[in-house]
Image (tube, rainbow, N blue to C red):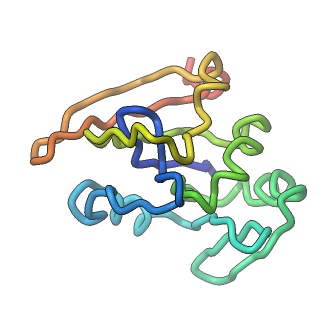
Amino acid sequence: MKLILQAQITKDGYIARKDGLRDWYLKPELFGVSNFLGNASAMLYYEDGKCVIVTGQEEISVEPSLLKEQLSSMATLSGYIALEASPQSAPILRTLMAAHCISEIRLIHVPVKLRKGGIRFPVSEFKSHWKRISIEPSDREPCVLFSTYREKTNLPL
């Protein structure tokens, strides 16, 4: 099973304001976020120091140190596990990226700058490991860019 990460990200690289709020986010139903989450076989999120994987049949709570092992045990399932970048998921994003667990990253580039800082999306420190495979503008206002990245080790030959 693939783990696909989706993030709404500002022009200056943030996924949340300094206080953790995401009030600048686009409506999920308008830009594919609802479809992304709704079509997933499972969803992964981080809450109260635990990683939680929710499937149609069960909810599995896992210590972050055991997450890679749990994801490996789910490798034969079809579809994908959805992970949406958020202030809450930020602690596990670096871990998952460093462990090469994320198959694909889908970014929605929102035309906003936070300028004062916030919670940064951690892809920059792993940038050399990823290749952008597509980028396209939206067909509605506000105009956003959709880009997809795959880890270089996961690219098809």
Nearer to the camera, 111 or 108: 111
- Specify the farthest residue to the front: 116
In the image, residue 4 above or below residue 132: below
Residue 111, quarter of the rendered image: top left
Residue 108, quarter of the rendered image: top left
Q: Position of residue 146 (x, y in %)?
A: 31, 37
Classify residue 79 as left or right of residue 33.
right
- Specify the farthest residue to the left: 140
Q: Is residue 61 visible?
A: yes
Q: Position of residue 7 (x, y in %)?
A: 46, 48
Residue at 26% of width from left, 63% of height from top?
A: 27
Residue at 27% of width from left, 57% of height from top?
A: 26
Q: Is residue 79 visible?
A: no
Q: Position of residue 82 (x, y in %)?
A: 54, 58
In the image, residue 35 above or below residue 5: below
Classify residue 143 as left or right of residue 112.
left
In the image, residue 56 above or below residue 75: below
Q: Position of residue 63 (x, y in %)?
A: 86, 66
Q: How many marks?
A: 0
Residue at 72% of width from left, 52% of height from top?
A: 92
The quadrant the C terminus occupies is top right
Residue 79, quarter of the rendered image: bottom right
Classify residue 139 as left or right of residue 86.
left
Residue at 74% of width from left, 66% of height from top?
A: 51
